[in-house]
């Protein structure tokens, strides 16, 4: 199974951009990159997904490296409500199961 | 639309008992997946149901089972509870199954404590 590697934790200041990295060096050509986040005491929440091109939505942007071996989730202006564990996940295999890693705990400092 | 609902939110059981957890997906969603989340193992996939059929199964013992009803509501059952089954059990629904772009919508989870 393809795996992802993320830093255990990151800190950022409120109202500043945040770049959350993810390495997936064994990604295959058909694996989609998904990001979810889990706020304290809640279930995970979908953030964004992409295959090859950079993607934007109202929550975040996803920048995918040209070789697809890494990607970066960008929160353009972090708020205290963005403090959560962010998971970078590959949706893979014939059944496209989500294979969850340990995620990155994002700490936002006021 | 109402989100994914899970009942009960909290449960306390003793070893050897069995437990049934319930999940109501978002209206119109036909796929329901179950996950176990523990501090040590993180999020682990249990199984997925689509149109009342189990489509995928994770690496859990047979004590963990589930089913899906015709209205897409799902239940999971754990028999002969062990201390290690203490966890947050999360249910997620999606419109379809088996597509790489499927988005999963999670419920708040059921916190199970086994004493």
Image (tube, rainbow, N blue to C red):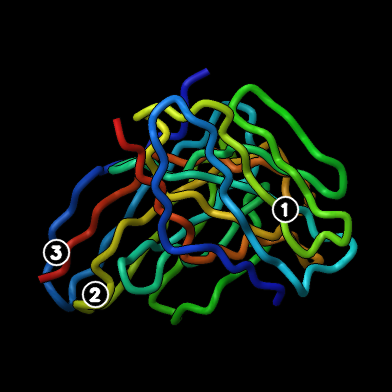
> Residue A86 placed where, x, y %?
49, 49
> Residue B81 placed where, x, y %?
24, 75
Label 2 element class: loop
Quick check: B30 above or below A22? above
Whole-angstrom CA distance, mark 2 to mark 3, is 8 Å
The number of discs equals 3
**Can you tell which mark lies on residue B19?**
none
Indicate which disc, 2 or 3, sits on the residue closer to the N terminus: 3
Q: Chain of mark 3?
A: B
- What residue do we see at 18% from left, 78% from top? B16
> Residue B32 placed where, x, y %?
56, 48
Residue density around tag 1, few if under 14, some if 14–19, many if 20 or more, within 10 Å: many
| Depth order, front residue of B13/A29 | A29
Whole-angstrom CA distance, mark 1 to mark 3, is 38 Å
- Mark yes or no: residue B60 visible: yes
| Depth order, front residue of A78/A33 | A78
**In this figure, which residue is indicated by the disc labeled 2?**
B81
The part of the image, by quadrant, that contains residue B101 is top right
Quick check: A76 above or below B48? above
Marks 1, 2 in one chain: no
| Depth order, front residue of A58/B28 | A58
The part of the image, by quadrant, that contains residue B112 is bottom left
Verify CB contact (< 8 Å) between mark 2 and mark 3.
yes
**In this figure, which residue is indicated by the disc labeled 1?**
A33
Whole-angstrom CA distance, mark 1 to mark 2, is 35 Å
Label 1 element class: strand
> Residue B105 placed where, x, y %?
54, 38
**In this figure, which residue is indicated by the disc labeled 3?**
B13
- What residue do we see at 14% from left, 64% from top? B13
Q: Answer with left or right where residue A74 lies relative to residue B22.
A: right
Q: Answer with left or right where residue B18 lies relative to residue A12.
A: left
């Amino acid at each position: 199974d393809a795996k992802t590697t993320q830093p255990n934790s990151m800190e950022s200041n409120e109202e500043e951009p945040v770049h959350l990295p993810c390495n997936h060096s064994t990604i295959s050509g058909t694996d989609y990159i998904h990001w979810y986040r889990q706020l304290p005491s809640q279930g995970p929440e979908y953030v964004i997904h992409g295959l090859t091109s950079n993607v934007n939505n109202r929550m975040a942007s996803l920048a995918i490296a040209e070789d697809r071996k890494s990607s970066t989730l960008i929160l353009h202006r972090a708020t205290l409500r963005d403090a959560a564990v962010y998971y970078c996940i590959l949706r893979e295999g014939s059944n496209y199961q989500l294979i969850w890693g340990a995620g990155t705990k994002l700490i936002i400092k006021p | 639309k109402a989100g994914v609902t899970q009942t009960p939110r909290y449960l306390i059981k003793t070893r050897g008992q069995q437990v049934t957890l319930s999940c109501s997906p978002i209206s119109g969603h036909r796929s329901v997946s179950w996950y176990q989340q523990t501090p040590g193992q993180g999020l682990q996939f249990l199984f997925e149901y689509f149109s009342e059929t189990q489509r995928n199964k994770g690496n859990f013992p047979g004590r963990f089972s589930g089913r899906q009803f015709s209205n897409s509501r799902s239940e999971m059952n754990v028999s002969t509870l062990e201390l290690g089954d203490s966890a947050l059990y999360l249910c997620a629904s999606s419109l379809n199954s088996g597509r790489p772009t499927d988005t999963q919508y999670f419920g708040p989870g059921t916190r199970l404590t086994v004493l």
